[in-house]
Image: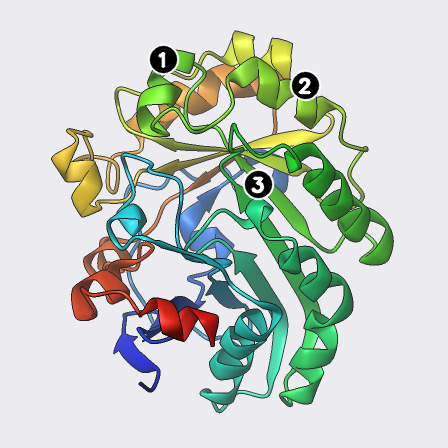
């Protein structure tokens, strides 16, 4: 079965049911339009993001799957409804990047961001490290794309039963800091400083906050951009700035605040997601205490058009391929 496409306001979602892969290519509205970050000089509060055409020659984001489905069962995410069918192979990772590049006419971009954040938990898949270290940059060139900067990003839910989690993250930081001279990113999904709330959100499958802090604070000082503590919030989110400040080093980390997406799972599980796209006060309550403690904070606000496209993880496969690919296809 060939790879299919769903067009969105800012890009495309590709999916291949036989391969069990789903991946996304999008442009960016520009940081001045959808980001508030005082430390970057972006101080305007964002009460809604106006949709406009995007130019992937400025910034091109490829978000690819590191697993086929996901073993995590986060209650705000739909991917687990698809099922879980193992890790993406090196060839699978290459296929997604190659397909994204070769199905656009653009052959130059100032910035090509590769997010290992579509389906799956990347720290379960050692091929992500190998692919980034030994294949990614050459592959982009082979596909005919001249990218001034190639910036890969790991986003992890810090799974509780991954015995090699700390080892994986240390290796990723070596890739970021040494091999890529700072040109890579690491994002830890925190979402709440309440372990009770986090357990409910991550279905008990993520480490508690103190365990995350122990691993995080053992990471080397970042070269280039700091590491990110991500908070996908609703009005009910618990974000205790003092507790966060006590557990994490603001010299190593920034905080990113963004809304929980309007997924089917989020709606079914009672997340209050009705006001977070056009009312900055929802973010203000989380941002200000952190700023008062000297933290660098990014508030990222997507547009309603992006959410209406259902660009959140897994939706294309779930919507168009309700029966996952066969075990025989996986073995092949």
Percent of width and height locating residue 311: 30, 60
Q: Which residue is mark 2?
A: 214
Q: Which residue is mark 3?
A: 187
What residue is at 21 percent from the left and 38 percent from the top?
266
Q: Classify 17 as above or below 276.
A: below
User: Which mark lies nearer to you, 3 or 1?
Assistant: 1
Q: Which residue is mark 1?
A: 196
Which quarter of the rendered picture does the N terminus lie within? Answer: bottom left
Distance, label 1 to label 2, CA atoms, is: 19 Å
Q: Can residue 249 be seen at all in this image of the molecule?
A: no
Percent of width and height locating residue 277: 25, 42
Between 131 and 287, the one nearer to me in the picture: 131
Determine whether the residue tagged by mark 3 lies in a helix, strand or loop: strand
Q: Earlier in the sequence, mark 3 or mark 1?
A: 3
What residue is at 48 percent from the left and 82 percent from the top?
99
Q: Classify 106 as above or below 331.
A: below
- Please tell me how crowded label 2 is: few (under 14), some (14-19), or many (20+) other residues with Cα within 10 Å: few
Q: Quadrant of residue 14?
A: bottom left
Q: Classify 163 as above or below 65.
A: above
Are discs 3 and 1 less than 8 Å apart at CB?
A: no
Q: How is the image coloured?
A: rainbow
Q: Earlier in the sequence, mark 2 or mark 3?
A: 3
Distance, label 2 to label 3, CA atoms, is: 15 Å
């Amino acid at each position: 079965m060939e790879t299919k496409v769903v067009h969105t306001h800012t890009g495309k979602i590709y999916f291949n049911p036989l391969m069990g892969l789903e991946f996304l290519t999008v442009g960016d509205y520009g940081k001045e339009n959808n980001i508030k970050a005082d430390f970057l000089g972006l101080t305007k509060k964002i009460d809604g993001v106006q949709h406009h055409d995007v130019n992937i020659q400025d910034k091109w984001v490829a978000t690819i799957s590191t697993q086929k489905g996901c073993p995590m069962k986060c209650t705000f995410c739909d991917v687990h409804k698809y099922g879980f069918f193992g890790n993406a192979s090196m060839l699978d990772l290459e296929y997604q990047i190659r397909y994204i590049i070769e199905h656009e006419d653009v052959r130059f971009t100032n910035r090509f961001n590769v997010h290992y954040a579509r389906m799956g938990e990347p720290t379960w898949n050692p091929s992500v490290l190998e692919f980034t270290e030994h294949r990614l940059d050459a592959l982009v060139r082979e596909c005919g794309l001249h990218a001034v900067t190639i910036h890969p990003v790991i986003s992890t839910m810090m799974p509780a039963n991954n015995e090699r989690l700390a080892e994986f993250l240390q290796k990723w930081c070596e890739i970021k800091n040494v091999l890529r001279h700072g040109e890579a990113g690491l994002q830890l999904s925190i979402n709440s400083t309440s372990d009770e709330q986090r357990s409910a959100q991550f279905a008990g499958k993520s480490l508690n906050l103190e365990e995350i802090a122990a691993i995080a604070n053992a990471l080397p000082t970042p070269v280039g951009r700091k590491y990110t503590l991500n908070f996908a919030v609703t009005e009910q989110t618990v974000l205790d700035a003092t507790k966060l400040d006590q557990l994490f080093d603001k010299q190593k980390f920034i905080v990113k605040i963004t809304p929980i997406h309007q997924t089917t799972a989020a709606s079914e599980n009672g997340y209050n997601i009705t006001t977070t796209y056009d009312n900055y006060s929802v973010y203000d309550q989380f941002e200000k205490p952190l700023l008062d403690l000297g933290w660098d904070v990014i508030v990222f606000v997507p547009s309603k058009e992006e959410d209406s496209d259902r660009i959140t993880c897994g939706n294309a496969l779930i919507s168009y391929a309700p029966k996952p690919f066969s075990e025989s296809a996986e073995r092949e």
